Image (tube, grey):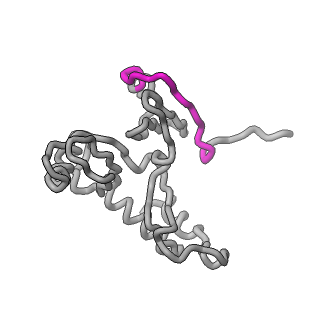
Amino acid sequence: ASDVYKRQVQEFPLLKHDHANWPESPEHIVAIIPGDEVLLLGCEVPGRTAGTVKKALPYALEEFVAGDIEDLHIAHEKIRPGQPVKCALISKQRLSQWQDCFSRAEIYPGNIISEGQLLTAEVNACTLVFNDGEVMIATNDESASVARSEVLGLISTMALAKVVCAVSYTHLTLPTNR
């Protein structure tokens, strides 16, 4: 495990011991992880039934990922044949590390979502969240982190009526008054 991950586990306080009204049921706990760890996308998958679409989903997603699709956890919304399937993909190893991190802190979320899933965008709009050398691009149905140098090329191919830009405060250094 990386040093950052080890620090996260060691520094994560046992929140439920400090809060009298901490929810006991996992369905009331949602964990939010960094958007650059999750690829959000929608894709067309052939099939006449939800079952056949679900079986074909990994094959349809292979073209969007660089590594082995079997190394990824695929979460998806309800499947409706003939409609795009909205998916969230994350490395199985990284998901396991996040689950372990939460377990060590005695937190058992019912859902784990990415920051990108919190960014809502209208149709024909996108949100750009700037971090160090990367930018998270979120549309109404997809989200991904890309290098800053790729942003203009990507958004120039989209039919956009609106672009919202934001800075990630986790990486923002503010000037101090002296």
Total count of labels: 0
In the image, what residue occupies the spot 42% across and 67% down? 99
Q: Where residue 92 sits: x, y (%)? A: 32, 60
Q: Quadrant of the C terminus?
A: top right
Instruction: Say left or right for 163 vs 82.
Output: right
Residue 161 lies within the magenta run: yes
In the image, what residue occupies the spot 58% across and 68% down? 12
The foreground one among 105 and 160 is 160
Bounds of the magenta span?
Answer: 155-171
Instruction: Say left or right for 43 vs 142.
Output: left
Residue 138 lies within the magenta run: no
The foreground one among 50 and 20 is 50
Q: Quadrant of the N terminus?
A: bottom left
Instruction: Say left or right for 89 vs 47.
Output: right
Seen in the picture, residue 143 relative to 107 is either above or below; the reply is above
In the image, what residue occupies the spot 25% across and 41% down? 83
In the image, what residue occupies the spot 44% across and 55% down? 113
Q: Where residue 34 sits: x, y (%)? A: 48, 51
Q: Quadrant of residue 94?
A: bottom left
Q: Where residue 106 sits: x, y (%)? A: 52, 76
Q: Where residue 84 sits: x, y (%)? A: 27, 41
Seen in the picture, residue 86 relative to 74 is either above or below; the reply is above
The foreground one among 36 and 57 is 57
